[in-house]
Image (cartoon, rainbow, N blue to C red):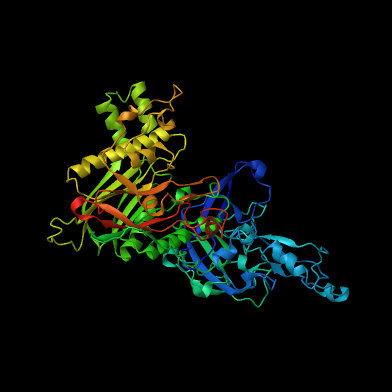
Amino acid sequence: MQGKDTLYTWHLSLRVDRPVEGCSMRPHAYMYGKKLDDRDVEKPLPPHSKKCREPPPAHEFSYRWFRGPPHDPCAFEGCPRRTSFSPHDWSMHALGGSATSLQCISTQSSLNQCTFCNSKCFVEAWKTQYTVPKDQGSSASTGSGRTTPLHMRGSSFASAIDDEVQSVDGGADDGSFVGTLGNKGSNPADEFSTGSAPSTPRGYLGGFIGYNPNDGDAPELPQSEEWVEISRDQVYVPGPDDVGRKLKLEAAAYSTETGELLMHRVVKTDLVLCRAPNPPKRNLVTSKVGAGGGGARFRIISYNVLSEIYATQQQYPYCDFWALSWDYRFQNIVREIMDASPDIVCLQEVQADYYENHVYAAMSEAGFEGVYKQKTRQSMGLAGKVDGCALFWRRSKFHLVESYSIEFNELAQRQATQVLGFNPRSEEGAAFLNRLSKDNVAQLVVLELAQPSMATRTNREPINQVCIANTHLYSHKDFPDVKLWQAWQLLQELETFVMSRGTNLPLMICGDFNSTPDTAVYDLLSRQTVHPGHPDVNMNTDDSIPNVLPDPMSITHSFQLGSAYQTIMGDEPKVTNFTLNFKGVLDYMWYSLQNLRPLSTAPVPEESVLTRNGEALPSTEFSSDHIMLMSDMQIINNGSRPP
């Protein structure tokens, strides 16, 4: 081969997440090329690669999905996973922290060739095994002669190890490089008919020709196994018939110009798990004070649902990869919200693209209307990869009167220039803005009862409106001054808004305040002021940190606020955020004492409940690292509390 010839390697990557009933499966298919250096020409190609004279052309994929036969997941008769395909039973936590299955290859054991879901089941089954005579054992021998179990990686997604076929011909060394698949492989699944290739894959969405999933393409599977084609769509949603079986995904890349088959690959999934059980019931604790003489009642929840962009295995290594996926978590979160039967829903960390495509549609179908405000920063990568706050209300209960959003970046800019007189381009002004510009936002709506209370002799001016604020303050633990400034500014904005509409407008402030009860943020909300000696207002010990707070005596507000949980339970919950690295209270539901009262709240589950299906949150059972707060509220008419 002449050195002037330029060669490329083509590679096809394909994976799918663990299939769970009701959760959409979207293939991650990617074909790419690499220019081949002269010194690498003679090296063997990795799997699912080929050599060609040209880089990969523009292409698109077609897909086919297949369902396999029933599968025995574990040979140990006492294993719960023989009959249960609940996500809780198949998590790392349930499997003992390992996703590794084992196969016994002792030729003289009665367990030879038996597969076990984890080491514990293998050990238990080994207690009942017996020795098979050598002549009998040799007939089934694999030739390895080993007596230790063979470990087989059970990943959360179909990987190269699970591939059922060698995707492409590796290419020859004689210079006969072509842009189509070779047919030198001995496996029938490696050969594709090109005689009736479609002119364009858009005209042939059903996959490619010449592949039969029952052709015996997987040596490790019994010949009696049959695979049934179930879909030719890109996205597949497993149903009840798929539970307990494995799926195969077949992907083929076609040239968009010629329709030529470029590469293909087939992967097999793990067993399909059933839909997660319904979320645990949250019983309500009712106020000891009677609820007579009040106005309208409504149920409100506040929930940080954990945005997908933050739900990574680096952050939550104790949670299964598939249980961190948005498709899995979304099903659980929506069911948890609907099970609470709320009238008002305050959500934090709602990702912008999923609000448009998933959250709003699900809430609207359930009878809610809503508004959304994303953080002011740029998206993390693709469009829509930025989180924000979402606020919903039940259409049959309320209708929207006013809706506003608050950007703390904008408030910082306004204070720097209009209040403090800084030049934003000056060193002092830039440091001030850099400290405070963290992209956080808040929402503000005024809702009116769809069936307003009528005036009576004892209640001549019934209150039929309520103001709801939803926010998510800055999260970094080293920025208590920023959190306090944001809380203070939010209260200042609410004061201006509420006071301009009369002093008797009920107010609730819900959200993730990223502040524990010992912080200045909590003091400000609950006591209207901050003690001058509080550490959060005396942290400026480094000249590199600008002082963004005014005199502590100026950090005040005029609202009289109570915490719904503290009022009903006598204290804040033990936790609202429960991870391995942090366990504490960050979320609150504040209400105006003058014209609202809490009737009940849903206690946060005990730690024993939070950890029964995982070390911490999120887990297969609890799909966020935060716990949903819920309270029943009642409007107090005439602006006076009962004795």
Q: Residue furthest front?
A: 643
Q: Is 306 positioned to the left or the right of 246 in the image? A: left
Of 157 and 52, which appears nearest the observer?
157
- Give coordinates of residue 161: x percent, y percent: 64, 59
The residue drawn where x is 53% and y is 64% is 19
Compared with 486, 353 (above or below) is: below
Q: Residue furthest bottom?
A: 224
Of 315 and 618, which appears nearest the observer?
618
On the question of residue 258 being in view, the answer is no
- Give coordinates of residue 4: x percent, y percent: 60, 41
On the question of residue 465 being in view, the answer is yes
Of 115 and 491, which appears nearest the observer?
491
- Give coordinates of residue 238: x percent, y percent: 49, 69
The residue drawn where x is 19% and y is 45% is 503
- Give coordinates of residue 499: x percent, y percent: 19, 42
Of 37 and 229, which appears nearest the observer?
229
- Specify the quadrant of the image occupied by residue 14: bottom right
The residue drawn where x is 13% and y is 60% is 455
Q: Residue furthest right?
A: 134
Q: Is 592 positioned to the left or the right of 19 in the image? A: left
Compared with 85, 28 (above or below) is: above
Marker count (numbered): 0
Compared with 148, 470 (above or below) is: above
Compared with 41, 277 (above or below) is: below
